[in-house]
Image (tube, rainbow, N blue to C red):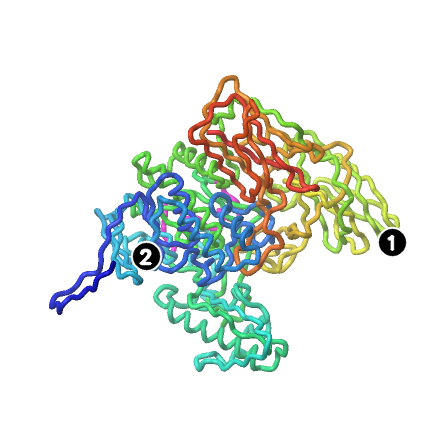
């Protein structure tokens, strides 16, 4: 029971309530990067203190700002197939789509808070700002000081390792870490895309707003500070004022200012613009259908793109992205475009952004994720070591979160081995780090999990069936060839493409068909022509045979391309299969302006075609019949250490005719198993934008929803009936002793066969 507190007059200075917390890792910043890092580290057994200066988690993705989480998938508008980030960020996006397909940012807040609250190794400090620190010597942080405005408590947070994911880099700045702000010259890193002073050297802030239909007329009286002269803005006539939320990213300002010290001034200018936009929408008379609309929400915190970038032992630059350079210490990947914005933002006469894509995803090295001079400081989120140009790609939230998961796992190894971050950057340590990351669902291009020491390395594997791609039934809609269409087909050694298609033509004509692949293995740019054919079409609906001579010399994806022909339609299929996808030579206006990327000469960017998928419920595969089936879906994929489609589907897929698909694992002698980890298909090609955009489904159709695990004697060890997640971890306490395991999967749908990318037994 509370009792009254009464203190008399005090002539001295009272002290705030003080709390000291010692952890293994202090993470400053609770955006997507800090959140994913905290969860990753906590699950690995580290005691984590997560410090967030806002009342909710998520940073730019939170309900306070409401920008969607996006990364290498780039709205499905580039050639990066199956490129959604893995691990914890994937888990969060999958869960958000399951609970929140409409994209309500409030619900994303709850998911992030719940995931953090479930981890008992995390101490979460919300509304708590770091304002000072102490060092032990010149190059190490001893502790940081933080203050919570809501409970008047001062915190002293100590740890052997720190991660700055604060966005502006408050910890790195106070500690004396080397940093940059602004754009490098073209000469420093041979970056031909580096901007000049006229374009500007910093990306600005954006502020978002929502409108709501009240069902009755609503008037709007603008505040006195609203900008009433929007028509004078250079790009005003090109603005689409009917859109809201983060689609208004172009309402940007601040690139000419100090994006840290002038943040409040920038916010005020954005408020002036936003309220001026709404005044124009409501009161100009140009929008008669907005009478019932009210301004439901205007952001109070701008979404900040750029401020300090800190220096690591490696600084990423334009060539790393465009040339897709490989690094011995690769621990993550990116794939967003090199995306620069004019510094004048909404006041510029230039387009709101300039985006140039690479031909595929690129590796991100560990050496760019820690400070080169503060020895126990990791660089999380957008603080990573990159030039301004490379930062244009690495800065997006899903990429930053994926990087930070690697940092958290690196912290685990540093503590186990008694190392500081730079000491981990050796070939042997990197192999160990990569293996840990891959086991957790992280994707690293051109890197497979080493399963030599896994229990499955000496196990026998049997499956009840293997899907062979002999045909996709003509069960889907007719698709016009108003755009060129390609079917991605996974082939193995010595396989050829000989097939039948159903085409419908409005007249007798010639249909051009090409067989293509990509110059760089693992890319899906379709920039290498292998063979050309012409089919003489007769008016009406007919089945045609196409026979290619090209013989594959290894596992890869080939693309059967039906070139644009406005007179022709092709019959599609309703059957959807893991690792099989159709793409179209068109563009997504969110990230491109043409179906061909045609950069100016002399900026170091490649010209190429975009071949992009359609979102479900569209995106049907072609209907076809193959003379010889393709056999890329066998059980061997379960042990190749890759858990998504790359050069091949990398999945065991069961035959649809198999009523009870089973995987049987057997050993010569009993094994003690503590954990089984299963990797399912939640369609890594789907971007899963977290807010505003919405999705037509809450569960990915490829994902196995129900399965059972039994031992050799028929004893049920685990049953799952409602799975929607990519990775399922089944723990046994105490460990079980078995000579045999049977995993029985149920097909996700009548026209979708069950698939499994891999499994790990520990």
Marked residue nearer the N-terminal end (1 or 2): 2
Magenta-drawn segment? 309-326
Which quarter of the picture shows residue 427? top left
Query: Along the horizontal axis of the image, is 359 left or right of 562?
Result: left
Residue at the outermost top position: 668
Judge whether 460 appears above or below 586 on screen: above
Residue, disc 1 = 507
Judge whether 568 appears above or below 645 on screen: below
Q: Main secondary structure of the magenta part?
A: loop
At 64% from the left and 55% from the top, the residue drawn is: 596
Judge whether 414 appears above or below 506 on screen: above
Q: Give SS at disc 2.
A: helix
Give yes or no for residue 325 being in the magenta stretch: yes
Give yes or no for residue 193 being in the magenta stretch: no
* In front of the other: 30 or 236: 30
* In front of the other: 320 or 332: 332
Q: Position of residue 417 (x, y in %)?
A: 32, 34
Task: Quote the CA–CA distance across marks 1 and 2.
Answer: 67 Å
Query: Along the horizontal axis of the image, is 490 left or right of 254?
Result: right
Image quadrant in which the N terminus is located: bottom left
User: Can residue 186 be spotted in the picture?
Assistant: yes
Q: Where is residue 291 in the image (x, y as percent from the top left)?
A: 60, 78
Binning the other alpha carbons within 10 Å of mark 2 as few (below 14), some (14 to 19) or many (20 upward) gives: some
Q: Where is residue 161 in the image (x, y as percent from the top left)?
A: 31, 44
Residue, disc 2 = 170
Between disc 1 and disc 2, the foreground one is 2
Q: Give SS at disc 1.
A: loop
Query: Along the horizontal axis of the image, is 283 left or right of 55?
Result: right
At 54% from the left and 47% from the top, the residue drawn is: 84
At 26% from the left and 46% from the top, the residue drawn is: 22
Q: Position of residue 304 (x, y in %)?
A: 43, 62
* In front of the other: 117 or 222: 117
């Amino acid at each position: 029971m509370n009792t009254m507190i009464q203190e008399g007059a005090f002539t001295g200075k009272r002290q705030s309530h003080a709390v000291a917390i010692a952890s293994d890792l202090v993470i400053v910043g609770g955006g997507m990067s800090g959140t994913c890092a905290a969860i990753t580290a906590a699950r690995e057994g580290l005691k984590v203190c997560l410090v967030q200066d806002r009342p909710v988690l998520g940073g730019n993705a939170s309900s306070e700002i409401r920008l969607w989480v996006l990364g290498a998938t780039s709205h499905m508008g580039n050639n990066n197939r199956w490129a959604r980030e893995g691990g914890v960020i994937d888990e969060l996006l999958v869960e958000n789509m399951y609970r929140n397909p409409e994209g309500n940012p409030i619900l994303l807040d709850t998911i992030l808070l719940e995931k953090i609250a479930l981890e008992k190794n995390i101490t979460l400090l919300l509304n708590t700002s770091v304002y000072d620190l102490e060092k032990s010597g010149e190059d190490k942080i001893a502790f940081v000081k933080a203050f919570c405005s809501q409970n008047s408590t001062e915190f002293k947070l100590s740890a052997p390792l720190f991660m700055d994911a604060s966005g502006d880099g408050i910890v790195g700045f106070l500690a004396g870490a080397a940093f940059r702000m602004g754009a490098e010259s073209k000469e420093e890193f041979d970056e031909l895309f580096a901007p000049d002073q006229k374009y500007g050297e910093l990306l600005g802030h954006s502020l978002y707003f929502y409108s709501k239909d009240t069902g009755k007329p609503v008037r709007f009286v603008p505040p006195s500070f609203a900008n009433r002269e929007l028509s004078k803005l250079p790009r005003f006539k090109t603005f689409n004022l009917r859109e809201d939320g983060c689609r208004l990213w172009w309402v940007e300002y601040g690139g000419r200012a100090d994006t840290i010290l002038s943040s409040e001034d920038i916010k005020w200018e954005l408020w002036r613009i936003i309220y001026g936009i709404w005044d124009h929408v409501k009161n100009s008379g140009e929008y008669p259908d907005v009478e019932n609309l009210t301004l439901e929400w205007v952001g109070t915190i701008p979404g900040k793109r750029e401020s300090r970038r800190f220096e690591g032992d490696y600084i990423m630059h334009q060539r790393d992205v465009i040339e897709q350079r490989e690094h011995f210490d690769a621990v993550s990947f990116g794939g967003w475009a090199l995306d620069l914005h004019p510094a004048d933002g909404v006041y510029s006469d230039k387009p709101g952004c300039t985006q140039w894509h690479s031909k595929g995803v690129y590796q991100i090295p560990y050496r760019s994720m820690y400070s080169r001079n503060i020895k126990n400081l990791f660089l999380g989120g957008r603080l990573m070591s990159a030039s301004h140009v490379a930062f244009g790609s690495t800065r997006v939230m899903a990429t930053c979160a994926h990087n930070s998961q690697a940092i958290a796992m690196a912290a685990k190894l540093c503590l186990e081995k008694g190392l500081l971050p730079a000491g981990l950057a050796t070939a042997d340590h990197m192999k160990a780090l990569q293996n840990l990351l891959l086991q957790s669902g992280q994707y690293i291009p051109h890197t497979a999990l080493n399963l030599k020491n896994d229990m499955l390395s000496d196990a026998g594997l049997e499956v009840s069936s293997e899907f062979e791609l002999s045909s996709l039934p003509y069960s889907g809609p007719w698709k016009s060839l108003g755009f060129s269409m390609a079917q991605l087909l996974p082939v193995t050694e010595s396989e050829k493409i000989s097939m039948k298609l159903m085409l419908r033509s409005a007249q007798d004509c010639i249909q051009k068909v090409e067989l293509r692949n990509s110059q760089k293995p693992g890319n899906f740019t379709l920039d290498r022509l292998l063979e050309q054919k012409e089919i003489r079409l007769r008016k009406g609906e007919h089945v045609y045979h196409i026979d290619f001579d090209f013989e594959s010399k290894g596992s890869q994806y080939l693309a059967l391309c039906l070139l644009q022909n406005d007179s022709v339609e092709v019959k599609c299929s309703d059957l959807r299969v893991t690792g099989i996808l159709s793409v179209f030579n068109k563009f997504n206006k969110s990230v491109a302006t043409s179906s061909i990327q045609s950069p100016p000469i002399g900026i170091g960017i490649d010209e190429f075609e975009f071949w992009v998928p359609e979102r479900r419920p569209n995106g049907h595969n072609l209907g076809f019949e193959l003379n010889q089936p393709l056999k890329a879906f066998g059980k061997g994929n379960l042990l190749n250490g890759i858990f998504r489609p790359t050069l091949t589907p990398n999945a065991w897929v069961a035959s649809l005719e198999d009523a009870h698909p089973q995987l049987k694992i057997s050993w010569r002698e009993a094994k003690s198993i503590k954990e089984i980890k299963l990797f399912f298909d939640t369609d890594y090609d789907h971007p899963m934008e977290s807010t505003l955009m919405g999705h037509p489904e809450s569960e990915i159709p490829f994902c196995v929803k129900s399965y059972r695990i039994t031992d050799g004697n028929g004893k049920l060890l685990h049953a799952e009936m409602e799975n929607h997640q990519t990775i399922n971890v089944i723990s046994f306490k105490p460990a079980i002793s078995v000579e045999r395991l049977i995993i029985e999967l149920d097909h996700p749908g009548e026209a979708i066969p069950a698939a499994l990318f891999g499994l790990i037994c520990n």
